[in-house]
C-alpha cells in the first residue's frame, strides 16, 4: 500500500477507535456495534478491524468500506501515462480489490465515464465481455453517480460468462469444479485462491452459451464428465431463487451441479466473495463451509435438510426453514445410538430414520433488523414473512411484546400475512427469535418525509439522497447509506417520484411565466427554497413564510397543485388548519422536512368546530425552526416530545392574514388578481393543470442532488441582495430585508437549475424588492377596520356639541390627554344617530387589538367621565415628535 494511504488510514482509525499500541498490534478500540473496547488490528497492515467478542458480537470492518473516501480517488493518486495507461485501474484492482495482476494485464483497460447532465467524470476499469459488450466499474468517488457500474448500451451479454485470460476452455474442462458467480470481481476472487470461476454478470443470467462451449471443449478433449458446476450467487432472495433454479436446470442438462452460499439460507449481511477475500475468508475450510451452506439451501425436503444440519452441527433440537415453511427438528441421541447398533448402519443413516420433524408455522419469517426512534423512545423489530404460495412476501414491524409470547405472535402473524399460522410453542419461538437477533442490525427511523439534518440525507418515499448520490430503498425497506441505515417509520408514502437521471423536464416554466408572470416565478422560487429549509435555517436561523392572497379564480390552487407534482404528490393542495384538530395540525406540520406545508383558508370567520381555534400566533416559532407543538411521551417520567419544525410555510387564501406585527413581519405577501388575464394565460394555466406528474416528479431529486451548488449560490446571492436593500434605502426593517433577501437568493439559485430567461429573472428580482416595500408599508398601517373606526371616532369627536354633560363625550376616560376609552355600544349609538355605518362589533373586537396609530392598551371597566362604571376599549393617545400628545399638552 502507498505510504500516503497507509498514513491517512492509520490516522483515521487511531482517531476514531482510540487504540492502545501493543507491539505490532492495535488493541482495545471501541467497537461501533457492541460498544466494548475489543476492536483490534495489525499496526503494519490495518486493513481489517475486528471485534474480539467473536461469539457475542463478531463485528468486522474493512477500511476501504469504513473510509471509502480515502480509496475513491484512484486516478488522482495514480495518473495514467503513456508508458502505463492503466495506472489507476491497476492500483484499484491491486489495493481496493486485493488482486495479484500477474496474468490479468491486458484483459482490462482504463477508461473515462462522463455524466453529461451533471458534468461529472470518473476513471473506470473496463472488461470486455463475450458477445461484444463490456462491463466497467467507476473508481473515482462512485458515490456521486446513480450507478457504480455500467454495461455497454445495447450490446448483448445474456447467455455468456466472463473468465480470466488464464482460465481458458481447455483448463476449465480439465478442472475438478467451476464456481459460477455473479460479478467479475467475484470470479477474480476465486481465481486468487486457486479456484476456477466464471462470472455470469447477473444472478438471473443462465450461461447456456458458455456451457455449450464448455461441453464442446470437454468432448474435443475426450474428457469424461467435466467439472462440477457450483452456482455461488450473492446473498439475497434473488440469488437464492436463481441458485435453486439453475442447479436444477444444470442437472437436467446432465451436469454435476451444486450450490454455495455465504449463509445457509442465503440471508443476512450482504457480503460478496470479494469482501470475503479481503477478510481472508476464502481459505479451504471456508469453502467447505460455503459448499455445505449450498447443500442446505437446495435440500430436496425438510427431513433431508434437518439431517444435514444435525450431522454438521450436532444439535438435538432446532428450527429451520424449508419451502417457505418453518420446521422444528428433534433428534433423540439415545434412540439414534440404539438404531445404529441394532441395524448396523452409520450414524447418519440412523439419524435420518429417527428424525422427528414437524411444521411449526405454515410460513417462514426472519427478523431483518431492529428499528428505533431515539426521539420518541419507540422501538420495533422488522420481519419479513414468506409463504409457500406465489404471493409476495409480507414485511411489517412487530412490537417486542408480540415476539415474547406464542399467542401474541400468532395474532400479529395473522394480521401481517394472510393465512399465516404459528402452531409452535413459546419456548420454540424464544429460541428461534434469539437465534435471529443475536447480531441484529439496527436501523434508525424517521417520522417525517424529506431531509434529516442529523443524517444530512433526504428520505423521499422510495428514493434516498445523500451527498448528491441517489439510493433506492432496498429489499428490506430501508436505505443503506454506508455507515448509516435509515427508513421511514410510517407506511404512508406521500410522495410517488418517477426519477430518471437522464431526463429533466423544464418546459413547464414557460407556462408558469405566461399564466402568472412574476407572481408565478416568485412562488416557484419559494417552493424551491423550501427544499433547502433545514440548510438555510442552519446557516441563518430563520426562514420566512409566503402568503398567497387574492380573489377566487386567480389560479392560486392550480399553481400550488402543479408545484406539488414537482415533488411527486398528486391531487393535493394543502390543509385547512381551522378544520384540523390539535393533533392533526401537529402531525401535518411535522410530517415533512425540506418541503412546504400549505395552509389554505386558515382565517375564515366561521366558528371553530374543535376545542381550540387556530391562531396565527402559533406559527411564530416555526419561523426559526422551533417546535410548534409538543406532546407527552408515554413513560413513567416527565418527558415530552417537541419535534422541531423542519419545513416551510405557505399560506394560501383569499384574504390577508390578520395577526400581530410579530407574525406579519415573518410573512412575505403575494397578491394575485385577474388584471393580466387573457386567452394566452388561460391556455397556459390549462396546460399546467394537465401536466403529467410522471414527467416532472423527479424535480425534487434533481434539486437535492445539486445541494452543494445551490447553497453556494444562495449564500452569495443573499448577501448581494442585503447590500442592495441598503443601497435602495426603501426598507430598513431588518427582518423584512432578511426574508426577502432569502427569496432573492432562492430565485438566483433556482436559475442555476432551471432555464429562466434573463428578462424574467430581472423582473422577478424587482418584484421581490417591491414586495418588501409593500410589506413594510402594510405592517406600519392599521387594518382597514381599525382605520374606519378611527375615522368615525375623530369625526364624531370633532362634531360633539359643546356641552358640560360628559356623558355625551365619546371618549369616556378621565385623562383624555393620555388615554382614549371607548364603549363600543356607545360608539355604535353615536354612529346610528348621525347616519354613519360602523364596522360590525365582531370585526371591531377582532381587529382593534392591532391598532397602531393609537396603541391598544386594554379592555376594562372604567369610571367614566359621566360618573358611571362602563366597559371600554382603552387606547394610548399618540405622542407628537415634540413630546406633546394629540390634545396639544405636554406628555
Image (spheres, grey):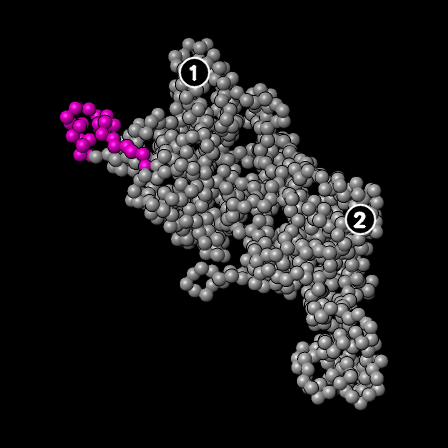
Q: Identify the residue at horizontal 57%, vertical 49% (top origin).
A: 449
Indicate whether residue 657 is drawn in magenta: no
Quickly name the residue at label 2. 517
- Name the quarter where the C terminus is drawn: bottom right
Q: Who is closer to the viewer here, 254 or 746?
A: 746
Please say if the residues under marks 2 and 1 sit with CB atoms less than 8 Å apart.
Answer: no
On screen, residue 525 above or below 620: above
Q: Which mark, by number, is residue 253?
A: 1
Q: Work out whether residue 578 or residue 213 is closer to the camera in this orientation and state it.
A: 578
What is the chief secondary structure element of the magenta stretch? helix
- Closer to us: 330 or 225: 330
Tell which circle, 2 or 1, labels the residue nearer the N-terminal end. 1
Specify whether 566 is left or right of 292: right
Which element type, helix, strand or loop, lies under badge 1? loop
Asked if residue 329 lies left or right of residue 176, the reply is: left
Q: Quadrant of residue 515?
A: top right
**Residue 123: image tag:** none
Q: Which residues are magenta?
A: 333-360
Q: Position of residue 145 (x, y in %)?
A: 61, 39
Instruction: Count neighbours of disc 1 (C-alpha within 10 A) and say few if under 14, some if 14 to 19, many if 20 or more.
Output: few
Amino acid at each position: 500500500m502507498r505510504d500516503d494511504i497507509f498514513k491517512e488510514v492509520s490516522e483515521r482509525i487511531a482517531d476514531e477507535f482510540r487504540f492502545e499500541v501493543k507491539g505490532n498490534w492495535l488493541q482495545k478500540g471501541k467497537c461501533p456495534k457492541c460498544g466494548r473496547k475489543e476492536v483490534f488490528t495489525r499496526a503494519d497492515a490495518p486493513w481489517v478491524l475486528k471485534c474480539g467478542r467473536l461469539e457475542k458480537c463478531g463485528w468486522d470492518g474493512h477500511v476501504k468500506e469504513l473510509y471509502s473516501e480515502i480509496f475513491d480517488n484512484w486516478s488522482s493518486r495514480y495518473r495514467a501515462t503513456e508508458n502505463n495507461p492503466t495506472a489507476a485501474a491497476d492500483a484499484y484492482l491491486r489495493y481496493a480489490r486485493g488482486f495479484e495482476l500477474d496474468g490479468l494485464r491486458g484483459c482490462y483497460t482504463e477508461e473515462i465515464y462522463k455524466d453529461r447532465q451533471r458534468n461529472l467524470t470518473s476513471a473506470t476499469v473496463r472488461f470486455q465481455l463475450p458477445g461484444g459488450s463490456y462491463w466497467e466499474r467507476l473508481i473515482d468517488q462512485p458515490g456521486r453517480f446513480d450507478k457504480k457500474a455500467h454495461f455497454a448500451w445495447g450490446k448483448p451479454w445474456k447467455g455468456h460468462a466472463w473468465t480470466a485470460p488464464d482460465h481458458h476452455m481447455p483448463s476449465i474442462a480439465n478442472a475438478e469444479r467451476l464456481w459460477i458467480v455473479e460479478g467479475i470481481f467475484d470470479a477474480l476472487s476465486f481465481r486468487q485462491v486457486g479456484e476456477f470461476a466464471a462470472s455470469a454478470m447477473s444472478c438471473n443470467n443462465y450461461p447456456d452459451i458458455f456451457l455449450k462451449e464448455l461441453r464442446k471443449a470437454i468432448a474435443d478433449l475426450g474428457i469424461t464428465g467435466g467439472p462440477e458446476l457450483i452456482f455461488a450467487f450473492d446473498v439475497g432472495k434473488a440469488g437464492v431463487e436463481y441458485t435453486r433454479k439453475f442447479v436444477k436446470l444444470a442437472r437436467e442438462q446432465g451436469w454435476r451441479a451444486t450450490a454455495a452460499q455465504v449463509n445457509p439460507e442465503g440471508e443476512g449481511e450482504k457480503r460478496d466473495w470479494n469482501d470475503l477475500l479481503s477478510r481472508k475468508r476464502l481459505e479451504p475450510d471456508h469453502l467447505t463451509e460455503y459448499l455445505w451452506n449450498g447443500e442446505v439451501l437446495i435440500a430436496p425436503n425438510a427431513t433431508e435438510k434437518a439431517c444435514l444440519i444435525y450431522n454438521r452441527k450436532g444439535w438435538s433440537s432446532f428450527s429451520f426453514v424449508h419451502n417457505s415453511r418453518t420446521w422444528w427438528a428433534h433428534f433423540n441421541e439415545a434412540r439414534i445410538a440404539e438404531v445404529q447398533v441394532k441395524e448396523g448402519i452409520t450414524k447418519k443413516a440412523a439419524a435420518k430414520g429417527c428424525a422427528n420433524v414437524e411444521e411449526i408455522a405454515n410460513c417462514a419469517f426472519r427478523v431483518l433488523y431492529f428499528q428505533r426512534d431515539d426521539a420518541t423512545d419507540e422501538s420495533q423489530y422488522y420481519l419479513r414473512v414468506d409463504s409457500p404460495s406465489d404471493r409476495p412476501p409480507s414485511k411489517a414491524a412487530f412490537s417486542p411484546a408480540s415476539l415474547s409470547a406464542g399467542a401474541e405472535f400468532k395474532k400479529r402473524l395473522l394480521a401481517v400475512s394472510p393465512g399465516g399460522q404459528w402452531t409452535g410453542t413459546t419456548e420454540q419461538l424464544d429460541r428461534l427469535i434469539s437465534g435471529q437477533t443475536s447480531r441484529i442490525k439496527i436501523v434508525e427511523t424517521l417520522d417525517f418525509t424529506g431531509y434529516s439534518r442529523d443524517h444530512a440525507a433526504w428520505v423521499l418515499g422510495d428514493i434516498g439522497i445523500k451527498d448528491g448520490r441517489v439510493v433506492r430503498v432496498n429489499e428490506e425497506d430501508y436505505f443503506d447509506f454506508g455507515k448509516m441505515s435509515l427508513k421511514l417509520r410510517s407506511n404512508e408514502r406521500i410522495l410517488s417520484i418517477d426519477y430518471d437521471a437522464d431526463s429533466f423536464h423544464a418546459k413547464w416554466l414557460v407556462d408558469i411565466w405566461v399564466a402568472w408572470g412574476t407572481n408565478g416565478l416568485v412562488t416557484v422560487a419559494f417552493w424551491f427554497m423550501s427544499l433547502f429549509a433545514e440548510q438555510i435555517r442552519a446557516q441563518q436561523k430563520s426562514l420566512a413564510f409566503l402568503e398567497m392572497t387574492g380573489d377566487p379564480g386567480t389560479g392560486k390552487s392550480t399553481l400550488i397543485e402543479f408545484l406539488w407534482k414537482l415533488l411527486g404528490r398528486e391531487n393535493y393542495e394543502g390543509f385547512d388548519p381551522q378544520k384540523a384538530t390539535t393533533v392533526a395540525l401537529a402531525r401535518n406540520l411535522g410530517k415533512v422536512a425540506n418541503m412546504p406545508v400549505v395552509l389554505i383558508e386558515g382565517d375564515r370567520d366561521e366558528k371553530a368546530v374543535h376545542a381550540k381555534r387556530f391562531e396565527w400566533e402559533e406559527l411564530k416559532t416555526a419561523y426559526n425552526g422551533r417546535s410548534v407543538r409538543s406532546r407527552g411521551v408515554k413513560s413513567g417520567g416527565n418527558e415530552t416530545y417537541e419535534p422541531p419544525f423542519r419545513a416551510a410555510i405557505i399560506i394560501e387564501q383569499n384574504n390577508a392574514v390578520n395577526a400581530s406585527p410579530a407574525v406579519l413581519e415573518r410573512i412575505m405577501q403575494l397578491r394575485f388578481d385577474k388584471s393580466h388575464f387573457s386567452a394566452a394565460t388561460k391556455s397556459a394555466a390549462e396546460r399546467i393543470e394537465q401536466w403529467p406528474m410522471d414527467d416532472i416528479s423527479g424535480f425534487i431529486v434533481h434539486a437535492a442532488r445539486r445541494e452543494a451548488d445551490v447553497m453556494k449560490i444562495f449564500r452569495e446571492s443573499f448577501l448581494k441582495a442585503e447590500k442592495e436593500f441598503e443601497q435602495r434605502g426603501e426598507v430598513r426593517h431588518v427582518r423584512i430585508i432578511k426574508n426577502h433577501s432569502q427569496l432573492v437568493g432562492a430565485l438566483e439559485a433556482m436559475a442555476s437549475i432551471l432555464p429562466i430567461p434573463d428578462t424574467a429573472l430581472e423582473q422577478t428580482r424587482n418584484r421581490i424588492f417591491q414586495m418588501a416595500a409593500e410589506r413594510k408599508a402594510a405592517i406600519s398601517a392599521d387594518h382597514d377596520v381599525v382605520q374606519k373606526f378611527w375615522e368615525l371616532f375623530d369625526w364624531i369627536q370633532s362634531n360633539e356639541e359643546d356641552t358640560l354633560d360628559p356623558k355625551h363625550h365619546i371618549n369616556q376616560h378621565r385623562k383624555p390627554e393620555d388615554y382614549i376609552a371607548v364603549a363600543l355600544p356607545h360608539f355604535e349609538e353615536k354612529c346610528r344617530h348621525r347616519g354613519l355605518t360602523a364596522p360590525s362589533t365582531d370585526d371591531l373586537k377582532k381587529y382593534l387589538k392591532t391598532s397602531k396609530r393609537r396603541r391598544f392598551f386594554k379592555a376594562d371597566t372604567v369610571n367614566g367621565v359621566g360618573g358611571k362604571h362602563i366597559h371600554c376599549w382603552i387606547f394610548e393617545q399618540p405622542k407628537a415628535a415634540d413630546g406633546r400628545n394629540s390634545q396639544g399638552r405636554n406628555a
